[in-house]
Image (tube, coloured by chain):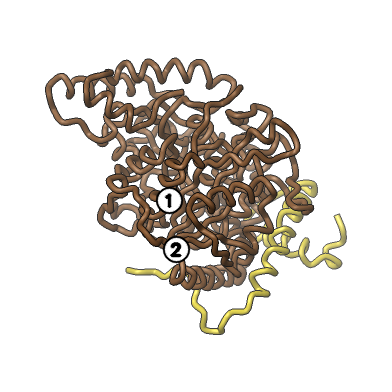
């Protein structure tokens, strides 16, 4: 594993895992970091898409 | 090959055959074909015998028979079946208590006279487009057993494609009806989001989960769809619409406007998939190309929402039983559960935008068509797909053409088309399905177009050669 200070994505994953109550060894964390990096890459697509500031999210709660 | 649902129901209603005789034929087909394909995870033959006897008793008593009387079917093993454990393809569910009641739509199929014969294999927890299940084995393609059936409803599609059953049920979160229907060469219907109730089904991504049928004929597909419609207050996502029957009239309206989806849908279709679209378009008289510009970003949004909801849903058991999840799903689920809220909110905003763009297209067109999978069925264990010179992981790539559509909940009927393209004789004998995509609540238009293609001989379920 790289030093987490040089890899913010890995640092985020380690912190988020701890916050959510997961305990994994380094090999398992490496696999989760790899999966999360794929999600992070695809998330850039949704942030690059131009939306109006007032665009609402799709799900609307209807009591 | 077993007959169509309509033919079977007609034979039983006329007294030409008994439900017991149809069930006996079905059991023999399952016994002969299932061992090589691994479609079933459980059989419900005692229940099937009871249901068949009830149908034959009704006939003998002169009572009117329901529309699917005596038609055998089976369900993806994420549907509750009274007395059976609902596995959803996962070892973590194997120790759960048996279901106390049937899923709503399983109950509706029973009331329509259909005979439940078993539960079918699927991708673990419905997370993926293959059915290479770590716990319950791989479901193989009926047209080439070296290839996969697709997923996550792989057992449902392969059982129909192999000729064991005329109807099965599955679920579709991002393509899990449409991809295996395409790869196995059968008809499949993913209705509008909220049309069919999901009560009594094992969830994956509540924002996208749909349920629907597979069949070996369009009329069978429509009969099953009609039998399952109707409100169900127990499912908060159910639109609570009255039944809008589709099976009684499957003719395409004169002057229907059909657009061929280009852009993303053309770029990610290989020559065989493009040929399938071309054949379907020609038979429907469609010549106009159009584009859903937000297709790529809608797919990305689906990815983010799927990861976040799936990860959150399974978090408690991922913490306690990580080793009991399959290796191909557990790290993806955990990673999804770490997605920041801001990504999910942005994805939901994008989703709304994509929906509005699609509604704009439906001002110009009544129906849109695109391939249902980027290529023919991949080999079992194949890691990547090569689509027009671009490599993409198989597990994710098979859904590249279905995810943008389920993200916005549109109804889609997949029809089996046989493009006859490919580098080998084996590839040229495989299908690539075509998506017939309707405006919300217009399943009738999707099914009518499917029926037109079936009557033209362009869409058909073929008997496997192997």
Residue B320 screen position, x and y as percent: 60, 44
Colour brown belongs to chain: B
Q: Quadrant of the C terminus of chain B?
A: top right
Residue situated in front as seen by the camera: A40 or B31? B31
Residue A30 screen position, x and y as percent: 78, 51
Callout 2: helix, strand or loop? loop
Q: Is residue B439 visible?
A: yes
Give the total number of marks visible in the rendering: 2
What residue is shown at x 82% (from left), y 65% (from top)? A7
Callout 1: helix, strand or loop? helix
A32 on left or right of B262: right
B153 on left or right of B25: right
What residue is shown at x 51% (from left), y 36% (from top)? B157
Of labels 2 and 1, earlier in sequence is: 2
Q: CA distance from mark 2 to mark 1?
A: 11 Å
Which chain hosts label 2? Answer: B
Is residue A51 placed above or below B111 in the rendered structure? Answer: below
Q: Quadrant of residue B17?
A: top left
Give the numbered dot on residue B257: 2
Q: Residue under circle 1? A: B449
Q: Is residue B54 visible?
A: no
Give the numbered dot on residue B92: none
């Amino acid at each position: 594993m790289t030093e987490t200070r040089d890899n913010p994505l890995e640092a985020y994953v380690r912190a988020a895992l701890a916050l959510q109550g997961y305990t994994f060894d380094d090999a398992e964390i490496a696999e989760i970091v790899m999966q999360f990096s794929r999600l992070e890459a695809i998330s850039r697509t949704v942030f690059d898409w131009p939306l109006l500031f007032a665009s609402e999210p799709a799900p609307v709660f209807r009591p | 090959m077993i007959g169509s649902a309509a033919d079977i129901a007609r034979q039983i209603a006329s007294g030409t055959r008994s439900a017991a005789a149809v069930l006996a034929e079905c059991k023999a087909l399952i016994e002969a074909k299932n061992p090589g394909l691994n479609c079933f995870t459980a059989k419900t033959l005692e229940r099937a015998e009871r249901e068949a006897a009830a149908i034959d008793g009704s006939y003998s008593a002169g009572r009117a028979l329901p529309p699917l009387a005596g038609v055998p079917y089976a369900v993806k093993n994420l549907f509750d079946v009274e007395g059976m454990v609902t596995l959803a393809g996962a070892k973590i569910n194997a120790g759960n208590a048996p279901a106390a009641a049937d899923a709503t739509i399983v109950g509706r199929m029973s009331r329509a006279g259909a005979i439940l014969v078993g539960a079918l294999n699927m991708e673990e927890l419905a997370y993926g487009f293959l059915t290479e299940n770590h716990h319950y084995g791989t479901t193989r393609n009926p047209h080439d057993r070296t290839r996969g059936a697709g997923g996550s409803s792989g057992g449902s599609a392969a059982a129909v494609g192999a000729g064991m059953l005329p109807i099965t049920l599955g679920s579709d979160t991002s393509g899990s009806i449409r991809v295996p229907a395409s790869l196995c060469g059968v008809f499949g219907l993913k209705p509008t989001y909220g049309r069919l109730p999901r009560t009594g089904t094992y969830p994956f991504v509540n924002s996208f989960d749909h349920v629907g049928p597979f069949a070996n004929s369009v009329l069978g597909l429509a009969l099953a769809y009609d039998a399952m419609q109707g409100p169900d207050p127990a499912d908060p996502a159910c639109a609570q619409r009255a039944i809008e029957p589709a099976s009684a009239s499957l003719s395409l309206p004169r002057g229907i406007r059909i657009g061929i989806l280009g852009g993303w849908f053309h770029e990610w279709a290989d020559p065989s998939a493009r040929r399938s679209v071309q054949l379907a378009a020609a038979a429907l008289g469609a010549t106009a190309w159009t584009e859903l510009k937000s297709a790529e970003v809608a797919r990305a949004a689906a990815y983010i929402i799927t990861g976040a909801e799936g990860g959150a849903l399974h978090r408690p058991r991922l913490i306690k039983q990580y080793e009991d999840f399959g290796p191909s799903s557990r790290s993806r689920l955990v990673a999804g559960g770490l997605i920041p809220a801001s990504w999910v909110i942005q994805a939901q905003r994008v989703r709304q935008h994509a929906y509005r763009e699609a509604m704009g297209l439906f001002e110009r067109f009544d129906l849109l068509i695109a391939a249902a999978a980027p290529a023919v069925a991949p080999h079992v264990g194949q890691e990547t797909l090569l689509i027009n010179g671009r490599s993409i992981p198989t597990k994710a790539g098979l859904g590249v053409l279905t995810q943008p559509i389920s993200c916005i909940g549109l109804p889609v009927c997949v029809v089996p088309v046989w493009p006859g393209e490919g580098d080998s004789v084996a590839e040229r004998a495989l299908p690539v399905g075509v998506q017939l995509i309707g405006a919300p609540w217009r399943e009738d238009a999707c099914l009518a177009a499917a029926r037109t293609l079936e009557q033209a001989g362009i869409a058909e379920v073929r008997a496997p050669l192997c």
